[in-house]
């Protein structure tokens, strides 16, 4: 069901706002509306322009907290503003030097890692780099070229070019190396290598270093290890420093965060001057509370002279759309997930949570009736819902429980149909009867959906929807009469005469066809027919009526899948038992176990989706709009 809401206007001295929040508002859930928007026509009202004094220190606290692996706030006492600010600033100062040193080492590590990657391809070169750099008449260039161009270079240019290429390393894409060329021919040879896509690289070798690329590489790796070791020691030192102040930091952060969030309530508030004393400023808060919370809140502030509250019913609040807060029994509460997926009910609309909980579980059980598999779903779903807090687990648990009941009715346990007797019937014993029962079940659900539509329309005093809508009284007469006639025909009973059928089916269809003119006539409007061509109106109305009649048939036939999946489940388990060699008297239990796991997982998922489709398209579309807005309580600590 939907919680009954009250609209509150809370006011008091501006200087008393924080006390009011901590003393009273923190105990309740309130959905705040923007007071400036609500009181836009009042000239004396202005917004709060105060900056949050906790924002800067809160950012510092969060930066410190990011370095703390454990953040358990339970049972932490509060600090005053002065104590909290002092604790956070002390923590920032104590780790600032360590943090700066860590950043410096991090940058040094990145540079050394880059040097290692640059030297890696040249490690095979066994020549002193300092001697190469001292060449006077020979020029050189380190770099890489694509493998395909290197192959062309060795075939077509290597012998005729006045250069020596020394290969240092390669992979699937590139060849790294250095080429030497006489100084006089350097420009021409460089141009040739440019054509070969040679990419020059400058090796990161210190000016005073003497040795081969391998020696430079090893020295750099050694330095990199030292930097990493220093970073680990520094990290440990930083953790120790934070651990020593852990309790103070957590207390300060919790206190600052709480006051910062409470201070942000000013974003939704407004300020107003007292007429008698223009120097005194009052705050104004507007929002929604449940009727139960409102009573408790009013009792709390009854003797407080600095807090004033005016309450209004939802219809008198001036707000077009109160927020929706659902409240259902624990067994049906998980099904609020499906309702929210479709759209929350508008305030005052029928809450379909219990309806979908009952019908979803019932159809799932019909389509997936098995004692063993149903119990597994029920136990597994309950465990996930209870201990892992998975809402979907609660849905699976209830659906599995109903599947277990239908397993007894079908006489099936883990696909075995000879172990327990069928308390009702086996789906495969008479396929046509199974499908007919599914259709009859669907007809009953569609009729219930129509009755819910009528209930909603009457509740909202909407005559057109209640009487003339395809799901209203007219639609119910048409559908119910047609379904009853088909039922009489199939059972061999006499179908009502043509005159009777014309009255109970033809007249309601005519009312649906002319619903807009009829509604205008009953409301005493000047124009009975809508603006535009009357011919076009009749054409559109006829097409819409044809679609309505067709939807009655297709919606009903859709419920054949309930029986079809019951047959499919029995058939799939029959295949599993055949593959396991059950009839031979020496069954393969491994195949039976694996088959049950496969059917439970795969068919359970498919059945769950198909049932949800029936809920949304065949039933919800008839009576439910889902245009509500969620009740979102402002987080007051």
Image: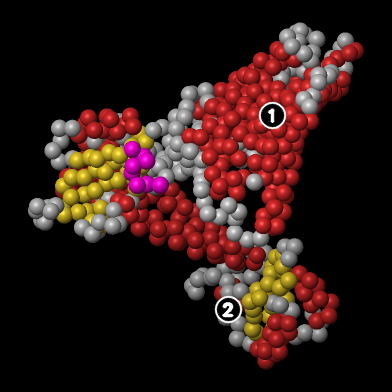
Where is residue 17 shown, x and y percent of the image? 20, 45
The image quadrant that residue 10 belongs to is top left
Q: Which residue is depicted at the point 32% across and 52% down?
A: 38
Q: Residues within 10 Å of mark 1 (few under 14, many from 20)?
A: some
**Does 112 appear in magenta?**
no
Magenta extent = 313-320
Q: Is residue 627 above or below residue 572?
A: below
Q: CA distance from mark 2 to mark 1?
A: 99 Å
Q: Is residue 378 above or below residue 200?
A: above
Where is residue 4 shown, x and y percent of the image? 39, 33
Q: Which residue is depicted at the point 54% across and 27% down?
A: 354
Q: Earlier in the sequence, mark 2 or mark 1?
A: 2
Q: Which of the two marks, 2 or 1, is nearer to us in this view?
A: 1
User: Which quadrant of the rendered structure holds the C terminus?
Assistant: top left
Mark sitting on residue 328: none
Q: Residue furthest bottom?
A: 184
Look at the numbered disc 1 and give the secondary structure of its residue: helix
Q: Residues within 10 Å of mark 2 (few under 14, many from 20)?
A: few
Where is residue 32 shown, x and y percent of the image? 34, 45
Left or right of residue 385, residue 146 in this image: right
Q: Nearer the viewer, residue 141 or 371?
A: 371
Q: Residue furthest right?
A: 584
Where is residue 181 shown, x and y percent of the image? 69, 84
Left or right of residue 456, residue 135 in this image: right
Residue 386 showing in the rendered view: yes
Residue underneath mark 2: 133
Residue underneath mark 1: 480
């Amino acid at each position: 069901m939907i919680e009954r809401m009250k609209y509150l206007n809370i006011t008091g001295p501006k200087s008393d706002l924080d006390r009011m929040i901590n003393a009273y508002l923190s105990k309740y859930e309130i959905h705040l509306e923007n007071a400036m928007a609500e009181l836009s026509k009042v000239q004396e009202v202005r917004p709060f322009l105060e900056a949050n004094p906790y924002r800067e220190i809160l950012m510092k606290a969060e930066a410190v907290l990011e370095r703390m692996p454990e953040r358990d706030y339970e049972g932490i006492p509060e600090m005053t503003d002065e104590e909290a600010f002092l604790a956070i600033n002390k923590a920032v100062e104590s780790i600032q030097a360590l943090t700066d040193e860590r950043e410096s080492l991090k940058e040094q590590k990145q540079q050394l890692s880059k040097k290692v990657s640059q030297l890696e391809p040249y490690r095979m070169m066994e020549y002193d780099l300092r001697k190469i750099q001292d060449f006077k008449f020979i020029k050189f260039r380190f770099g890489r070229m694509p493998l395909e161009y290197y192959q062309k270079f060795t075939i077509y240019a290597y012998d005729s070019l006045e250069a020596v290429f020394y290969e240092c390393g390669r992979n699937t894409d590139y060849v790294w190396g250095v080429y030497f060329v006489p100084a006089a021919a350097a420009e021409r040879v460089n141009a040739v290598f440019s054509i070969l896509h040679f990419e020059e690289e400058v090796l990161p070798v210190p000016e005073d270093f003497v040795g081969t690329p391998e020696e430079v590489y090893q020295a750099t790796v050694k330095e990199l290890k030292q930097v990493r070791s220093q970073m680990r020691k520094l990290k440990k030192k930083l953790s120790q420093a934070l651990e020593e102040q852990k309790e103070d930091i957590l207390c300060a952060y919790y206190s600052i965060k709480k006051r910062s969030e409470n201070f942000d309530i000013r974003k939704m508030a407004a300020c107003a001057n007292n007429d008698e004393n223009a120097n005194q400023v009052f705050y104004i808060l507007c929002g929604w509370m449940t009727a139960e919370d409102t009573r408790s809140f009013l009792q709390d502030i009854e003797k407080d002279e600095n807090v004033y509250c005016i309450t209004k019913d939802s219809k008198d609040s001036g707000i077009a759309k109160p927020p929706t807060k659902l409240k259902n029994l624990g067994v049906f509460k998980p099904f609020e997930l499906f309702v929210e997926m479709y759209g929350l009910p508008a305030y005052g609309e029928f809450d379909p949570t219990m309806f979908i909980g009952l019908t979803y579980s019932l159809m799932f059980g019909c389509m997936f009736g098995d004692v063993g598999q149903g119990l597994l779903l029920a136990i597994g779903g309950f465990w996930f819902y209870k201990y892992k807090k998975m809402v979907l687990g609660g849905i699976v648990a209830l659906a599995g429980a109903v599947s277990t009941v239908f397993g007894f009715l079908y006489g099936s346990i883990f696909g075995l149909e000879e172990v327990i007797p069928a308390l009702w019937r086996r789906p495969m014993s008479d396929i046509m009867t199974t499908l007919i029962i599914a259709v009859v079940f669907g007809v009953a659900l569609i009729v219930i959906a129509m009755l819910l539509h009528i209930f909603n329309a009457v509740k909202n005093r909407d005559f057109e929807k209640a009487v003339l809508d395809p799901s209203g009284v007219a639609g119910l007469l048409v559908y119910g009469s047609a379904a009853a006639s088909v039922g009489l025909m199939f059972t061999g009973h006499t179908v009502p005469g043509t005159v009777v059928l014309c009255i109970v089916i033809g007249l309601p269809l005519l009312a649906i066809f002319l619903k807009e003119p009829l509604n205008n006539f009953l409301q005493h409007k000047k124009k009975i027919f809508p603006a535009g061509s009357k011919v076009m109106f009749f054409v559109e109305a006829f097409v819409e009526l044809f679609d309505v009649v067709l939807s009655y048939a297709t919606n009903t036939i859709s419920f054949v899948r309930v029986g079809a999946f019951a047959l499919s489940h029995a058939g799939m388990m029959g295949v599993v038992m055949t593959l396991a060699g059950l009839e031979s008297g020496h069954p393969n239990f491994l195949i039976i176990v694996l088959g049950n796991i496969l059917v439970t997982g795969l068919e359970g998922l498919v059945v769950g989706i198909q049932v949800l489709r029936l809920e949304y398209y065949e039933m919800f579309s008839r009576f439910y709009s889902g245009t509500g807005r969620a009740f979102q309580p402002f987080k007051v600590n």
